[in-house]
Image: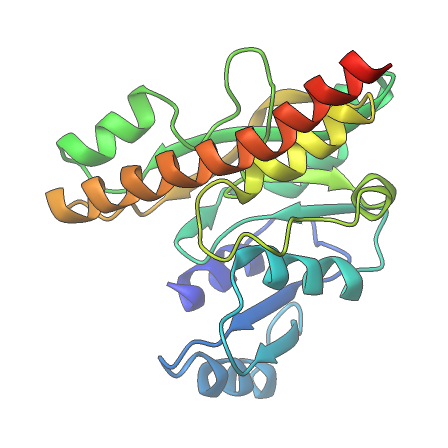
Amino acid sequence: MLQRLLRSVNALNASPNEVIVINDGSNDQSSTFLKSWESDKHEFTPIVLNNPISEGPGVARNMGIQLASSEAIAFTDDDCILLPSWIKAIKYSKYWNKDEIAGIGGKVIHLRKGAVSEYYSYHRILEPPKYNQYLVTANCCYLRDCLLEVNGFDETHKYPGGEDNGLSFKLVNRGYNFRFETNMIVIHDYRTSLFSFLKTFYRYGKGCAEISFKYLTNKSASTMEG
């Protein structure tokens, strides 16, 4: 999947300033593949950080934020494929001119046919919700200064599911907002088994509940004290 993602980066019709890959303690030969990619001729050489032990998505993404030097930092996952216009859609989005904007999110469509994949797409599970309360890191881009202002993702949240919401809640609590960029599109290779579907939604539900309680109750308490 990582090879497929990097090939899609290679096929973008506008080059990113830098490509950062955080290998979060995987044991699936990702490190070996990335070394071979660096030695071959490609449009870019990724900045690779191999974290020897998995510390969760929050820690991994914060490592990427610290390595990044660009004004805006876009996120995706290794089970995604970028459409060729992805970078241009981000760079030329009309929403960057809006006041108090911290980031934009885009559309996520399914790669494989089937009830599970089509369910994800139909209900826009990996897209910003209707009122743009939060962004999803399968396809989003934040202003780097905003990320640094709130110290990035919550590193105490150690498993996938909820960390996206936590970052967005921290930014919303500072007065920032988000927008949905329809031209910013990735294809997602969803796991299609019923067991994976149930496991994913259990993890999302548990993580989102924990994060929402942590940040929304803190915001409510601050408002009452104010």
**Residue at 72% from the left image edge and 21% from the top image edge:** 221
Extreme residue in the front direction: 225
- Rendered image quadrant of residue 27: bottom left
Q: Position of residue 180 (x, y in %)?
A: 61, 21
| 199 with respect to 46 (left or right) | left
**Residue at 56% from the left image edge and 60% from the top image edge:** 10
Rendered view: 165 above or below 39: above
Judge by depth and name the residue closer to the eye, 57 or 212: 212
Q: Position of residue 9 (x, y in %)?
A: 56, 56
> Dividing the image into 4 quarters, which one contains the C terminus?
top right
Q: How many discs mark residues in the rendered view?
A: 0
| 162 with respect to 168 (left or right) | left
Rendered view: 122 above or below 146: above
Residue 184 in sight here:
no
Q: Position of residue 22 (x, y in %)?
A: 59, 68
| 150 with respect to 106 (left or right) | right
Judge by depth and name the residue closer to the eye, 179 or 215: 215
**Residue at 51% from the left image edge and 12% from the top image edge:** 130
**Residue at 44% from the left image edge and 51% from the top image edge:** 160
Residue 21 in sight here:
yes
| 42 with respect to 205 (left or right) | right
Q: Position of residue 42 (x, y in %)?
A: 60, 73
- Rendered image quadrant of residue 117: top left
Colour mapping: rainbow
> Dividing the image into 4 quarters, which one contains the N terminus?
bottom left
